[in-house]
Amino acid sequence: MFNKPRSGLRDAGTDGQRIRITDLNAGYPGRPVLHQLTFDITALTMSALVGPNGSGKSTVLGVLARVIDPTSGQLHYAAGRPPAFVPQRGAVGDALPLTARQTVEMGRWGQRGLLRRLNRHDRALVDSAMQRLDITDLATRQLGELSGGQRQRVLIAQGLAQNSDLLLLDEPTTGLDPEARERITVLLRDLVSDGTTVIQATHDLQAARSADSCLLLSQGRLVAQGPPDQVLTPTALSRIWQPA
């Protein structure tokens, strides 16, 4: 139970659940965001956190990535490696003098530390991630020179380089053209088939409809969870996306 910081990380059990959240509240100093969330994430599926800006999607990802401490409630993880988090493209500055490969190598910093050189195992994981995302030919290109779709694939490769079986993504398809969005969606489906549980926060309804399960959020509360065709109905969406 999260009565104390970082406490209560328990095994979610052997019923196929990768994550189980119960009565969870979280937010920032003086600003509560999430209210009494209860839901399960099934292992080896793709789940979409859906809702308008300000609905709490990114805060849920922050809690799952263990960078935001819940104020109360329970968060249970099944046995597995620590989650890998892929931020929004805008969170990584174009001005940083990083190549695509250096960006992917940052995924190993959690294991090696900022100042320690990568070893053979680290380099193999980076190579594998770049091959998996088909970006080996971009290795020496500056991050700021890449197209939106290329840059997103680099960031996903950085997540894969962390060698986790739980991948968290914040708006992975937002701002991309239809071809790039479709390519990212296919890549995520392939990752699930290869043994990764994927959770993405998105307000891209087309991307959300490709998920196995959708969690519909409004003002920090869970409105519905289930298959996309049952959750993303016109009636439900009209209730949370109010006209300006």
Image (cartoon, rainbow, N blue to C red):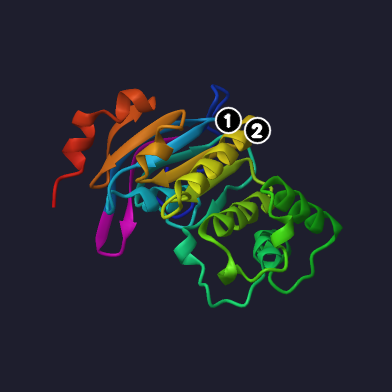
Magenta portion: prevailing SS class: strand
Residue picked out by circle 2: 195
Q: Describe residue 28's horizontal placement relative to residue 163 as left or right.
A: left
Residue beneath the point at 36% across and 48% down: 57
Residue 114 spot, x, y in % from top left: 68, 71
Q: What residue range appears in magenta?
A: 20-32
Q: Quadrant of residue 151?
A: bottom right
Residue beneath the point at 51% across and 59% down: 148
**Who is closer to the viewer here, 244 or 162?**
244
Assign the N terminus to one quadrant of the image: top left
**Number of numbered discs overlaid on the protein picture:** 2
Tag 2: residue type? Gly
Q: Describe residue 11's horizontal placement relative to residue 237 as left or right.
A: right
Residue picked out by circle 1: 44
Q: Is residue 227 in sight in this rendering?
A: yes
| 10 Å crowding of disc 2: few (<14), some (14-19), many (20+) | some
